[in-house]
Image (cartoon, rainbow, N blue to C red):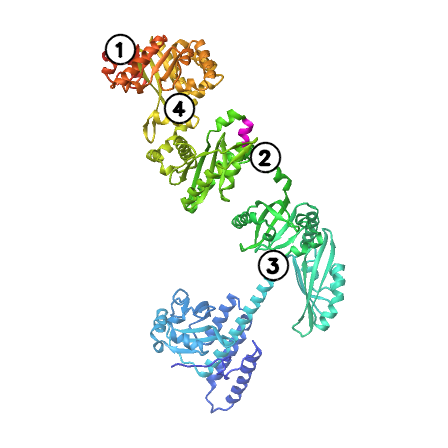
C-alpha cells in the first residue's frame, strides 16, 4: 500500500501550516490532544489507539526539541533514534542532496541493536543517485512522502532495500521554500501498518527537522561570512563598524594596527573610544545620516605613536532588525596613497627641472603628458605645450626618420627593455634638432600595452661632432666620397637585403685611364683636382640609393643595390662612361678623361661581398686591357666565365691559406748542361687546396699579387726554404738555393737588411742563395731598382734575371745591371722546333756569353732540346725533361745522385 501526503510549501497543498520552529507544532499537537481527550470520554469511540500514538509522538517531540535546535552530529543521531523508536522503525536515516539535487548523501543514521537489518552505511546506500531510483526521485521532487513495502517497490529500489533486509520503507522529504533538499528515511525489517494520523505526525516532525536544519545552515553561513568579513578587514587593515542612534558601536570589525581593537570598541560610545579627530567628525555627520538616510564621506588625520595616519571614512545608513536607523562606517587607511601622491608630486617637480623632456604616449602613439622641457625641444612657449597634447609623436618626426621610428616602436612592443633611437624632431618654426629618445613599453597586469614612456634629450651638438668624426673615418678626405670602410658596410647591407627580397646587387669597378701620365706631367695638385671633378660628375648620374666610393688612387667603385632589372645596370654604366668624358678644365687646361669600367652582379657572379669585389675588379682589368674607355660585364667575358665562381672562391681561400702557412715549397733542379749534376734548386710555392686539390701557380700567384698577398707569400717561401737549406748544409750538400723576389719586396727599403738577418738566423751565407728577379720588375723604376740590386750584390747575393727576353731591356741596361745569371724565358725554348726560334735562341745565348753572364735555359722538355742547347754552349738547363718541381725529399735525392742519365 502506498500512502502519499503532500507537504507544506507547495502551491498545490494547504493541508498543513507550520510557521515557527516550535510554536506551530506545539499548538497543533495541543489541539489534537484536546480533541482526542474529548473523544475518549465517549466509551463507544474506538480511537484509544490513536490517543496512545499522539502521546508517544508528543513525548518524542518533547525529547528531541533541544537536539533539533542544536543539530550537531551527535544530537542529530540522538534525534533520529528518538524518531525511530517513536515510529517503531528498525532504523532512521537523514539524507541531504547535492546542490544540483541529482544525488543525495547519507548524513546521519541510527540502527536498532535488535534489528535484523544489515549495515547500510557503506555503498550503495551511502550515496543515492536519483537517476537510478526514479520512483523515489519523482515522489520526493513533488514534495510527497513515499511509504511502501518491499514487494511494492520497483525493481531498482527493491534490489537496493533487499541487500540490507528492508521489508518496509518510509521516505519523507525535507523542504526549504517548497523545494526538497533531502529526506528522512525510516526502515523496518518487517512490514508494519501506519495510520494516516501517524503519517501526518511524522510529516509535521520532519517539517520541523527541515526548518531546524535550514536555520542551522543559515547561522553557519552567517558566521562564516562574519569570519570572512573580519579576515577581509584584517587583510586590508581597515575598520568597519555599525552604531545606533545613541552613537554606540553595536558591531565592529577592525584590522588596523594603529586604531582600537574590536574588543575595545564593542558596546562603547564613539566619543569615548575612538581617536578624537575621527570621533569628532563622526559625531558631526551621524545625525544627518540617521535622520535623513543620506550617505557621507570625509577625510581626517589621526595622530598615532607611529606617526600620522590618513583616513577616508564612508558612512551609509542601514536598518537594524528592530526597525531603527543605524549607520555603518567604513574607515579606510589611505596613508600609503597620500605618501605616494606626495612622492609623485615631488617627482614631477624634479622632472620639471630636468633639461630632458619626459613623455607619456598612449598605446596609439599620442602624446598624453610631458614636462616643460618639451617646449624647449619644440621651440615653443611653455603655455603653448597644451596644443601638442593628443597629437601623435610622429607629427614631429622628420620625414626622413619615419621608418627608423617605426622600427624602434616595433622593437619596444617586442621587449621589456628600454629602446634607444636617435631622430630629428621638427620644431614649431619648421627647423629640426637631433634628439635621442629612450622609450619603454608599460603593460597592464593582463599583458596589454597601456602606455609608452620615455625621455627625449637634445643631442644636436654631439651628433654633429660624431658626424664629423664619421666623415673622417668613413669618407675620403679629397673627394668626400665614401671610402673602403663605408663601402664594405654598404655592400654587405645591400647583399643582406637582396637575400631577403630576392633582388640583385651590381658592383662596378672604375679606373681612370692614363691618370699616371697626367699626374707625372702636371703634378699631384692637378691630379687631385681631376679626381674631385670626375668623382662629382660620376656621382651626378647615379640614382638616389646608389653609392659611389673612392677605392684608392684613381679607382672608384659604384654600388647599385635593389636591382630587379639588369638593364638598369647597363644603362647606368653608359651614363657613367659619358659623364667621365665631359670636359674638365683645370688651370686653364681642358681635358676629357675616360674610364675603364667592369661590372659584376650578386648572386649571378658571386656569393659574397668579397667575391663580388674580386669579380668586378677582374672585369675592370679586362675592360682596360681591351682598349680602355670601355665597359665590360662579368657575364659577357668568356674567359672569366670559364673560371667561374670557383676562381673567385679560390682567391678568397688563398688569403687564409697564406696566413695559416698551408702552402708548401717544392724544388726544381737546375742541372749542369755537360755533366747532369744538380747545381742549384729553385724554390717554388705550391698549394693543395682542401676543396679543389692542387691549384696551379699560374692561377694563385697572380691572385696573390692582385690582392696584395705576394709579399706574405714570398716571405713564407723564404722562411721554409732557408730552413730546408740549413738542413741540407748540415747533411753536407753544397747546392745553392734560387729564390724569386717580388716587386713589392724589392721596393721595400729594409728588404736587404731583413734578408741578411734571415740568413744569420739560419746560419747561412749570401753566397748560398741566388735571387731571381723578372726582367719586367728590374726595368720598373729602373734607377731605383738598380740601386737595390747593387745593394743586394754588395751583400754577396748573386742576381739572376728571370724570364729574360720578355722585358725589352736595352743592351746598356743589361750591361749596367749587377746580374750574374740570366734565365732565358721558357717561350724561347718552346720555339726551337722552328728555324727562327733556333736563331733567336742562338743570338740570346751569344749575347749573354759575350757579357760574361751565366746562362740558364728554362723549359727544356726533351733530349733533342738539351742536345741543341749543349751545342750552343749553354751552361745550365732547367725543365720538366730533368724534373718537375718536387718535394724537398725528392729534390735531396736528385742533389745527391745527380741527373746524369738525362744528358
Is 110 covered by the magenta stretch?
A: no
Query: Looking at the image, is mark 2 or mark 1 earlier in the sequence?
Result: 2
How packed is label 4: few (under 14 Cα within 10 Å), some, or many (20 or more)? some
Q: Is residue 532 left or right of residue 856?
A: right
The residue tagged with tag 1: helix, strand or loop? helix
The kind of secondary structure the magenta stretch mainly shows is helix
Identify the residue position indicated by label 2 in the image: 469
Identify the residue position indicated by label 3 in the image: 231
Q: Nearest the camera: 573 or 253?
A: 573
Identify the residue position indicated by label 4 in the image: 661
Q: Nearer the viewer, mark 2 or mark 3?
A: 2
Residue at mark 2 to residue at mark 3: CA–CA distance:
67 Å
Identify the mark at residue 870; answer none if there is no mark: 1
Q: Position of residue 610 (x, y in %)?
A: 43, 34
Quarter-of-image position of residue 240: bottom right
Residue at mark 2 to residue at mark 4: CA–CA distance:
38 Å
Amino acid at each position: 500500500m502506498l500512502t502519499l501526503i503532500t507537504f507544506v510549501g507547495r502551491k498545490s497543498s494547504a493541508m498543513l501550516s507550520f510557521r515557527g520552529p516550535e510554536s506551530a507544532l506545539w499548538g497543533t499537537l495541543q489541539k489534537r490532544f484536546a480533541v482526542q481527550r474529548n473523544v475518549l470520554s465517549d466509551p463507544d469511540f474506538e480511537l484509544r489507539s490513536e490517543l496512545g500514538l499522539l502521546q508517544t509522538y508528543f513525548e518524542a517531540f518533547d525529547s528531541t526539541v533541544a537536539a533539533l535546535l542544536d543539530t550537531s552530529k551527535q544530537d542529530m543521531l540522538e534525534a533520529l533514534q528518538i524518531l525511530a523508536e517513536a515510529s517503531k522503525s528498525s532504523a532512521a536515516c537523514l539524507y541531504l542532496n547535492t546542490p544540483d539535487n541529482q544525488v543525495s548523501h547519507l548524513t546521519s543514521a541510527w540502527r536498532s541493536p535488535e534489528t535484523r537489518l544489515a549495515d547500510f552505511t557503506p555503498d550503495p546506500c551511502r550515496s543515492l543517485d536519483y537517476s537510478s531510483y526514479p520512483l523515489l526521485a519523482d515522489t520526493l521532487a513533488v514534495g510527497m512522502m513515499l511509504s511502501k513495502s518491499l514487494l511494492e517497490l520497483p525493481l531498482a529500489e527493491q534490489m537496493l532495500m533487499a541487500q540490507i533486509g528492508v521489508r518496509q520503507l518510509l521516505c519523507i522529504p525535507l523542504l526549504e521554500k517548497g523545494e526538497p533538499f533531502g529526506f528522512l528515511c525510516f526502515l523496518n525489517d518487517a512490514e508494519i501498518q501506519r495510520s494516516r494520523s501517524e503519517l501526518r505526525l511524522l510529516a509535521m516532525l520532519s517539517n520541523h527537522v527541515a526548518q531546524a536544519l535550514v536555520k542551522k545552515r543559515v547561522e553557519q553561513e552567517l558566521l562564516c561570512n562574519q569570519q570572512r568579513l573580519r579576515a577581509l578587514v584584517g587583510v586590508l587593515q581597515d575598520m568597519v563598524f555599525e552604531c545606533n542612534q545613541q552613537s554606540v558601536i553595536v558591531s565592529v570589525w577592525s584590522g588596523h594596527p594603529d586604531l582600537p581593537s574590536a574588543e575595545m570598541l564593542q558596546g562603547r560610545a564613539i566619543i569615548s573610544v575612538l581617536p578624537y579627530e575621527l570621533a569628532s567628525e563622526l559625531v558631526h555627520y551621524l545625525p544627518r545620516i540617521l535622520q535623513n538616510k543620506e550617505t557621507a564621506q570625509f577625510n581626517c588625520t589621526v595622530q598615532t605613536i607611529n606617526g600620522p595616519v590618513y583616513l577616508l571614512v564612508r558612512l551609509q545608513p542601514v536598518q537594524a532588525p528592530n526597525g531603527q536607523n543605524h549607520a555603518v562606517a567604513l574607515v579606510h587607511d589611505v596613508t600609503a596613497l597620500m605618501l605616494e601622491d606626495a612622492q609623485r608630486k615631488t617627482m614631477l617637480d624634479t622632472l620639471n627641472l630636468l633639461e630632458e623632456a619626459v613623455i607619456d604616449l598612449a598605446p596609439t602613439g599620442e602624446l598624453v603628458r610631458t614636462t616643460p622641457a618639451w617646449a624647449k625641444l619644440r621651440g615653443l612657449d611653455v603655455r603653448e605645450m597644451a596644443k601638442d597634447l593628443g597629437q601623435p609623436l610622429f607629427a614631429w618626426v622628420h620625414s626622413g626618420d619615419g621608418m627608423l621610428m617605426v622600427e624602434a616602436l616595433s622593437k619596444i612592443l617586442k621587449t621589456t627593455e628600454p629602446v634607444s633611437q636617435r631622430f630629428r624632431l621638427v620644431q614649431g618654426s619648421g627647423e629640426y634638432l637631433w634628439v635621442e629618445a629612450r622609450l619603454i613599453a608599460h603593460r597592464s597586469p593582463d599583458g596589454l600595452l597601456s602606455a609608452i614612456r620615455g625621455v627625449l634629450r637634445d643631442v644636436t651638438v654631439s651628433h654633429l661632432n660624431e658626424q664629423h668624426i664619421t666623415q673622417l673615418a668613413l669618407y675620403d678626405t679629397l673627394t668626400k666620397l665614401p671610402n673602403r670602410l663605408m663601402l664594405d658596410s654598404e655592400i654587405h647591407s645591400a647583399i643582406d637585403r637582396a637575400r631577403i627580397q630576392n633582388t640583385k646587387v651590381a658592383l662596378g669597378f672604375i679606373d681612370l685611364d692614363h691618370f699616371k701620365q697626367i699626374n707625372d706631367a702636371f703634378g699631384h695638385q692637378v691630379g687631385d683636382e681631376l679626381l674631385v671633378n670626375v668623382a662629382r660628375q660620376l656621382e651626378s648620374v647615379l640614382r638616389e640609393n646608389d653609392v659611389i666610393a673612392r677605392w684608392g688612387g684613381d679607382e672608384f667603385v659604384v654600388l647599385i643595390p635593389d636591382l630587379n632589372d639588369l638593364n638598369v645596370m647597363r644603362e647606368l654604366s653608359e651614363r657613367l662612361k659619358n659623364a667621365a668624358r665631359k670636359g674638365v678644365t683645370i688651370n686653364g687646361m681642358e681635358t676629357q678623361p675616360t674610364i675603364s669600367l667592369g661590372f659584376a652582379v650578386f648572386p649571378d657572379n658571386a656569393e659574397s661581398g668579397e667575391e663580388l669585389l674580386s669579380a668586378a675588379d677582374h672585369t675592370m682589368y679586362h675592360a682596360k686591357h681591351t682598349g680602355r674607355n670601355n665597359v665590360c660585364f662579368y657575364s659577357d667575358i668568356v674567359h672569366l666565365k670559364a673560371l667561374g665562381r670557383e676562381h673567385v672562391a679560390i682567391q678568397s681561400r688563398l688569403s687564409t691559406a697564406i696566413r695559416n702557412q698551408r702552402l708548401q715549397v717544392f724544388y726544381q733542379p737546375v742541372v749542369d748542361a755537360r755533366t747532369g749534376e744538380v747545381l742549384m734548386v729553385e724554390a717554388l710555392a705550391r698549394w693543395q687546396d682542401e676543396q679543389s686539390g692542387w691549384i696551379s701557380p699560374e692561377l694563385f700567384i697572380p691572385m696573390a699579387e692582385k690582392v696584395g698577398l705576394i709579399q706574405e707569400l714570398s716571405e713564407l717561401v723564404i722562411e721554409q726554404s732557408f730552413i730546408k737549406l740549413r738542413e741540407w748544409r748540415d747533411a753536407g750538400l753544397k747546392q745553392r738555393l734560387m729564390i724569386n723576389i717580388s716587386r713589392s719586396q724589392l721596393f721595400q727599403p729594409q728588404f736587404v737588411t731583413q734578408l741578411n738577418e734571415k740568413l744569420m738566423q739560419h746560419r747561412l751565407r749570401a753566397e748560398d742563395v741566388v735571387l731571381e728577379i723578372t726582367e719586367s720588375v728590374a726595368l720598373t723604376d729602373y734607377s731605383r731598382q738598380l740601386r737595390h740590386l747593387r745593394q743586394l750584390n754588395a751583400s754577396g747575393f748573386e742576381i739572376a734575371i728571370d724570364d729574360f727576353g720578355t722585358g725589352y731591356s736595352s743592351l746598356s741596361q743589361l750591361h749596367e745591371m749587377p746580374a750574374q745569371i740570366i734565365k732565358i724565358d721558357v717561350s724561347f725554348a718552346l720555339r726551337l722546333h722552328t728555324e727562327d726560334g733556333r736563331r733567336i735562341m742562338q743570338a740570346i745565348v751569344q749575347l749573354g756569353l759575350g757579357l760574361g753572364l751565366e746562362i740558364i735555359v728554362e723549359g727544356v722538355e726533351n733530349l733533342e732540346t738539351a742536345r741543341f742547347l749543349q751545342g750552343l754552349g749553354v751552361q745550365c738547363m732547367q725543365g720538366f725533361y730533368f724534373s718537375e718541381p718536387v718535394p724537398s725529399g725528392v729534390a735531396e735525392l736528385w742533389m745527391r745522385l745527380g741527373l746524369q742519365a738525362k744528358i
